[in-house]
Amino acid sequence: MTPLARKRLGKILLNTAGVLVFLYAVFPVYWMVATGFKENDQIFTTEFVPFPTHFTFDHFERVLTEGVANNSIWLYMRNSAIVALGTVLIGSAFALLSATAIARFRFKGRGVFLVVLLVVQMLPAEGLLIPLYMMVKRVGLGDNFIGLIVTQVALTLPFGVWMLRTFVAAVPKSLEEAAWIDGAGRMQTFWKVLFPLVAPGLVATSIFSFITAWNDLVFALYLMSESEGYTMPVALQYFFGQKGVDWGAIMAGSTLMTIPVVVFFLLVQRRMVSGLVAGAVKG
């Protein structure tokens, strides 16, 4: 086999592997959406039904009109949005400032601090449930969105600091020094030079924080005792009843729950490309 043929074969195998991985990742999402439009006899059949033969909107209509636990589904969507957006805003601000300090300054205990962040990120969230629950209750933030947001920030902050630290360290310090020579202060340099260049990393951490807070079930279930404070993942648990599981409503609700995540990604992903070159040019 010639080198050119070997190279083409490698590309074909690599592309095939990529397609298989893509199908493996997308299939659960497709099955969720398709099941939401299936009739009950197609959902509970033992035969393989790859797509609905008769589309029905009954499951979506029931979720949207009847609600869950005597509350509208939009209440739970609003609660999830409050927690997710609050986590993104507060967590991103703390992560960016912490990452900048770690990447730009040398201080005693810096290495230990990074190791501690890594160790905390390795711990399962369920293992932190009891101590975080006791801390939130002790400061009087139980049954409160602020307590839930603070908890989500604590869970997502280590990852955000680690990722943004890499982006900040990759920005040449000479760009900041050039801004100082031109008369810019530290805050001007931070916002006009450093911030635009680390925007892609900030977008990536924001997406991670948003998805983590939006999909959280355990902390939202234990920190909120009233149904009016439940988020969407907790609300979907009500479709698991003693008489059976309403898979149609669960899949319809899960599909509706996925839409805000897609919208959030579409809104922030544009900042990724623009942030790669912004701030590196004078003027």
Image (cartoon, helix red, strand yellow):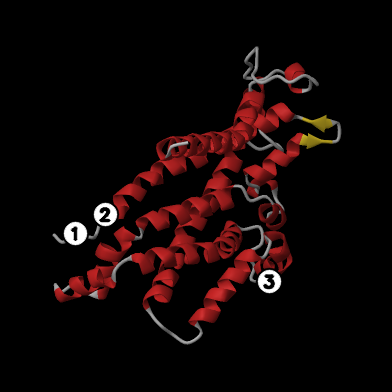
Q: Quadrant of the C terminus?
A: bottom left
Q: Is residue 138 visible?
A: yes
What residue type is disc 1 on? Answer: Val
Residue 188, given in percent of the width and then of the height, sits at 24, 69
Q: Distance between the residues labelled 1 and 2?
A: 8 Å
Residue 239, given in percent of the width and then of the height, sits at 74, 35
Q: How far apart are marks 3 and 1 (CA)?
A: 50 Å
What residue type is disc 2 on? Answer: Val
Tell me the element at label 1: loop
Horizontal side of residue 266 vs 173, given as left or right: right
Identify the residue under disc 3. Answer: 138
Label 1 crowding class (10 Å Cα cut-off): few <14, some 14-19, many 20+? Answer: few
Q: Residue at x 64, y 49 (%)?
A: 229
Label 2 crowding class (10 Å Cα cut-off): few <14, some 14-19, many 20+? Answer: few
> Disc 1 vs disc 2: Cβ atoms closer than 8 Å?
yes
Identify the residue under disc 1. Answer: 281
Identify the residue under disc 2. Answer: 277
Q: Which residue is drawn at 42% across and 65% down?
A: 166
